[in-house]
Image (spheres, rainbow, N blue to C red):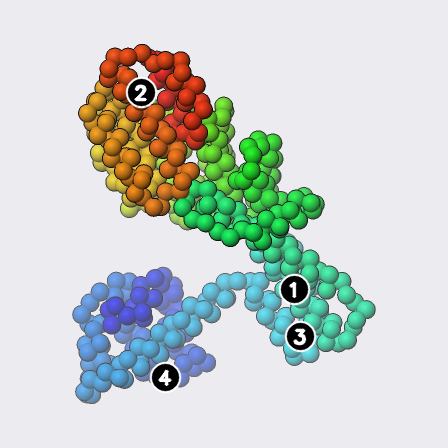
Amino acid sequence: MLQSKLISLLKTFTKKEIKEFGSFVRSEFFNKNKQLVDFSDYVCKFYPDFNTSELEKEETYVKLFPNLKYDEPKMRYMMSDLTLLLEEYISINYFMEDEFYKKFFLLKSFKDRKLDKFFNQNLEDINVSNQKKTYRDSEFYFNQYLIEETSYEFTSERRNRSFDISLQEVVDNLEFNYLAKSLKYYCEMVNRSNILSVKYNLNFFDELIQYLLKGDFNDKPAIKIYLSIYQTLSGADNQDVYFELLEQLQHYSQLFKQKEQRDMFVFAQNYCIKRINGGYDGAIEQMFDLYQMMVEKNLIYEGRYVSQPDFKNIITVGLRLNKIEWVEKFIADFKDDLNPDFSENATSYSQAWIHFSKKEYDKARRMLLKVEFNDVYYHLDSKSLLLKVYYEMNEFDSFFSLVDAFRIYLKRNKFISETQRNTYQNFVNMANKLMKLKSRGQKFTPDLIEEINNTKPMADLIWLKMKITEH
């Protein structure tokens, strides 16, 4: 029983939920089996760990039925029935936390019961309640669609054909919900196609984009913002669209829940990353400004923890701009909010970058050896930083050995998109070229600057240019 679904679900419960479930099982409306009450009480007393031999099926059965021989089918039925009650409690509890759906299903019940007076009262109440909500995301329009659809059904059932405004509202809100939600997922597909080795069929959405570009959705931030995001993710570089997106995020991001706000800013980050790798002037400063906005709005959190990728990237961008004091303060302010499972890794990588920025190359090298490559991006960035460390320390053998290993990794890893692969491959090739010239004591030619500028996309472009001018 220790590995059962029943125990797995109970392990996720809070103390409050364990107590409530006890009351739930005792309610005859939901359960009339007294044995399940005793079973529930016995199991729940081992909360929160549930890690004891006393929860083995035979042990549990003996405790519940001391005078009976162990009955495996009966035990299985009891576990199954209690699990069903547990799932019912979870579903009801989830439903009870959603004020909109509680009001909405009450409204539908009044309609079905022909309680016109109460229906009209509740229709006005749920309308006002939904309009008072802060958020204007796709969910808002879907909820409004449900309200208007129910209102339309009510009038149609009464054969009140003259009152048709709710029918127009049904169509409008359904359309706004569809456009906002589908455009959001379309942007995510375009984004993933840009950074990962995945392909999607986007033919239908191309037509949808054309429709949206011709329309006027300035009063619908849920559509307008994602349309701007799409324009930054695809097509030619257009800074005007990006600045328009930033203005929209500054003024309207609070109309969305925190997770969606954060996702919108991440899309904006990807535009900046594309410009940085393309070698555009001012791109890295734009990225830093964007991260500062996210820090101010507390959008670097994913749930209760600071996002590990954001933590790493904020530090990388800040140090590339030589904002060492700002970065050190950022680390001090937020390192304790990282997920404990990853905090040591993130902190080691961050400290390595700080040592590198202070030209403490040996300390940076030793710190990088502590970094575990638990995702593709840590691997790519850590290896790039280590290459630069070896370059600065004139560790020629280590440098060229790492170049070979890095190239193999880029070639074999299937989770790296072609854009990312080219970005880092170009950096490795150019760094390798500089190191070969450096190891031979040869001068860098002016042609190298031109070659770097013409090779896109390119990681660590600023550092490469700096090395050429220093030599």
Q: Residue furthest bottom?
A: 68
The residue labelled by disc 1 is 147
**Label 3 environment density (alpha carbons within 10 Å; few <14, some 14–19, many ≥20):** many
What's the mark number on residue 434?
A: 2
Q: Nearer the viewer, mark 2 or mark 1?
A: 2
Q: Nearer the viewer, mark 1 or mark 4?
A: 1
Q: Is residue 106 above or below residue 419?
A: below
What's the mark number on residue 236?
A: none
Left or right: residue 83 compared with residue 223: left
Quarter of the C terminus within the rendering: top left
Three-letter amino acid code of the residue under disc 1: Ile
Three-letter amino acid code of the residue under disc 4: Asn
Q: Earlier in the sequence, mark 3 or mark 2?
A: 3
The residue labelled by disc 3 is 111
Q: Secondary structure at mark 1?
A: helix
Q: Nearer the viewer, mark 4 or mark 2?
A: 2
Q: Is residue 34 above or below residue 425?
A: below
Q: Quadrant of residue 419?
A: top left
Please provide percent x and percent y for residue 205. 58, 51
Q: Secondary structure at mark 3?
A: helix
Q: Earlier in the sequence, mark 2 or mark 1?
A: 1
Q: What's the distance in space between the residues labelled 2 and 1, CA to CA?
A: 66 Å
Q: Earlier in the sequence, mark 1 or mark 4?
A: 4
Residue at (37, 22) in percent of width and height? 463
Q: Residue furthest right?
A: 162
Q: Earlier in the sequence, mark 4 or mark 2?
A: 4
